[in-house]
Image (cartoon, rainbow, N blue to C red):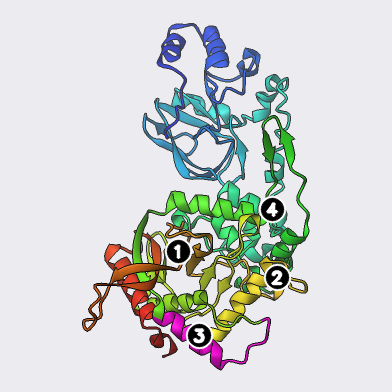
């Protein structure tokens, strides 16, 4: 993804062969990268030959970027292939590399200055190191008058960045470390959209390269559980907790705009929750090296245990008792106890293994798709787990009197995800892993199948059995094939010998 810091070899050759006055004109018309600045030569008349370099477009869809770090300083020389600076986009962090030799004369935009539109000047380069002092007082305004006709007057984009010092009024977050917060542009935007304010005022632990805060970190941020070493910070987190907790309620209560009809199509608006989930899954599919393992399960013993347990409980007419899905969730938690390496997360330079099994159970469908987390599924009883799932389902189905804020862990991310597609008649599926989790389990339809008869005393070669197919998606960075197979084997053992779930 290297970008050129010079124009073309032809332009440079022409520039060296012309007189001094001609060189200004060539600089004026050919040397400014980004294509957004065509400047009259008189604006350069007081400076030696130079090039004003704009923020590069590092991908076809990139509109803005953030300079994470300058790898060269003013007065430093560079050759082709040298990294000038590190640029963050909403999708990746890449180096801005030189393809020609030169000298950095002036850094216009400092690192960490916020989102910068592509084409906005970020530095000035010269060919001769002796020309560097001439640019000590160089300012972008010297180039702006010629760019004024272009209706990019909305360069107020840098203005909000300049206003970023506002959170400095809350030194509680910045003071402890004294370090600049590294975060992607998308993370900054999400923090503001979710009502958290400036990301520098939050106690978010970044999971991106070098501890950088990425969009998913903001989506998974829980203000109520954020560490608060300073009293002032506690107030900030408490204030942020309100909009965060109310997000599911607001999404459910705010009516969506009417569908928009077009020539041969219809546009349907999406709720915020659906867009957040889509963004999270899109990022996960790009970042996580998925692989998939499937296994067939016999459910006859599990169904018998379910009937036995429900018959012993005093259930009212609105209580469906323990479901097959509840037992399968408990079996998944028990398998995590047998193979704890699957209950883990990739943390760039280490793997984190969790003590508690917190399972996101996908409920609902379409725009009402949610994955509430069921906490500590390995240590809790079946009835407690069943009640939590029922409460979450009631919220999604919009039952009267249900309140999303009263459901434990609604909207949080656990350590493992389960999705049951059997109700739609799907035999198997390969789910997308939700970062930072390492595994996701998809369950298929429960059906009668003809299978080999394992009863040695029976004269029948085949028998009919209640079966299900389960597919495990794994992050190969955390869970290799052998570990994934061990987990599925443990899961199968608990499902086909469900008495072990009661131990």
Gap between marks 4 and 3 measured at Cα:
39 Å
Gap between marks 4 and 1 measured at Cα:
28 Å
- Mark 4 or mark 3, earlier in chain: 4
- Mark 1 or mark 2, earlier in chain: 2
Q: Is residue 380 visible?
A: no
Q: Which residue is mark 4?
A: 271
* Numbered disc in front, either 4 or 1: 1
Gap between marks 2 and 4 measured at Cα:
16 Å
Describe the element under mark 1 as helix, strand or loop.
Answer: loop
Give the image quarter of residue 370: bottom right
Mark 3 touches mark 1? (CB < 8 Å): no
Label drawn at residue 301: none
Q: Which residue is mark 2?
A: 404
Q: Is residue 88 left or right of residue 79?
A: right
Label drawn at residue 444: 1
Q: Is residue 42 left or right of residue 48?
A: right
User: Was residue 175 drawn as part of the magenta stretch in this picture?
Assistant: no
* Numbered disc in front, either 1 or 2: 1
Q: Which residue is mark 3?
A: 307
Above-or-below relation of 56 to 324: above
């Amino acid at each position: 993804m290297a970008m050129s810091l010079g124009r073309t070899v032809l332009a440079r050759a022409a520039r060296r062969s012309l007189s001094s006055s001609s060189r200004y004109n060539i600089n004026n018309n050919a040397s400014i990268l980004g294509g957004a600045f065509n400047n009259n030569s008189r604006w350069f008349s007081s400076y030696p030959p130079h090039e004003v370099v704009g923020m590069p477009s590092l991908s076809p869809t990139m509109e803005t970027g953030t300079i994470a770090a300058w790898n060269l300083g003013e007065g430093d020389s560079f050759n082709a292939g040298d990294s000038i600076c590190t640029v963050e986009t909403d999708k990746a962090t890449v180096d801005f590399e030189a393809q020609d030799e030169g000298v950095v004369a002036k850094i216009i935009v400092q690192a960490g200055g916020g989102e910068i539109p592509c084409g906005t000047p970020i530095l000035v380069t010269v060919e001769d190191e002796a020309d560097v002092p001439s640019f000590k007082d160089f300012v972008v305004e010297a180039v702006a008058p010629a760019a004024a006709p272009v209706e990019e007057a909305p360069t107020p984009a840098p203005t909000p960045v300049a206003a970023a010092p506002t959170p400095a009024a809350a030194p509680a977050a910045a003071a402890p470390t004294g370090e600049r917060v590294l975060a992607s542009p998308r993370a900054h935007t999400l923090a503001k959209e979710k009502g958290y304010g400036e990301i520098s005022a939050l106690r978010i632990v970044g999971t991106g390269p070098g501890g950088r805060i990425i969009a998913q970190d903001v989506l998974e941020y829980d203000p109520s559980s954020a560490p608060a070493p300073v009293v002032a910070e506690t107030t900030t987190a408490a204030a942020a907790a309100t909009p965060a907790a109310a997000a599911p309620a607001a999404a459910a209560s705010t009516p969506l705009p009417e569908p928009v009809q077009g020539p041969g199509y219809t546009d349907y608006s999406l709720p915020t929750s659906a867009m957040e989930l889509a963004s999270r899954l899109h990022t996960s599919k790009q970042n996580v090296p998925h692989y998939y393992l499937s296994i067939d399960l016999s459910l006859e013993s599990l169904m018998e245990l379910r009937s036995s347990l429900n018959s012993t409980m005093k259930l009212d007419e609105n209580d469906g008792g323990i479901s097959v899905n509840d037992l399968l969730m408990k079996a998944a938690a028990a398998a995590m106890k047998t193979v704890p390496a699957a209950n883990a997360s990739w943390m760039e330079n280490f793997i984190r293994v969790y003590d508690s099994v917190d399972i996101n159970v996908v409920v609902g469908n379409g725009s009402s798709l949610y994955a509430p987390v069921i906490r500590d599924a390995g240590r809790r009883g079946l009835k407690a787990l069943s009640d939590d799932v029922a409460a979450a389902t009631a919220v999604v189905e919009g039952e009267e009197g249900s309140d999303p804020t009263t459901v434990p862990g609604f909207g949080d991310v656990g350590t493992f995800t389960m999705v049951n597609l059997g109700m739609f008649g799907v035999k198997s599926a390969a789910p997308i892993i939700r970062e930072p989790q390492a595994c996701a389990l998809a369950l298929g339809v429960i059906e009668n199948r003809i299978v080999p008869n394992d009863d040695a005393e029976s004269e029948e070669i085949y028998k009919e059995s209640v079966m299900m197919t389960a597919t495990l998606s794994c992050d190969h960075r955390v869970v290799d094939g052998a570990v994934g197979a061990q987990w599925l084997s443990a899961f199968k053992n608990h499902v086909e010998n469900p008495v072990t779930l009661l131990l």
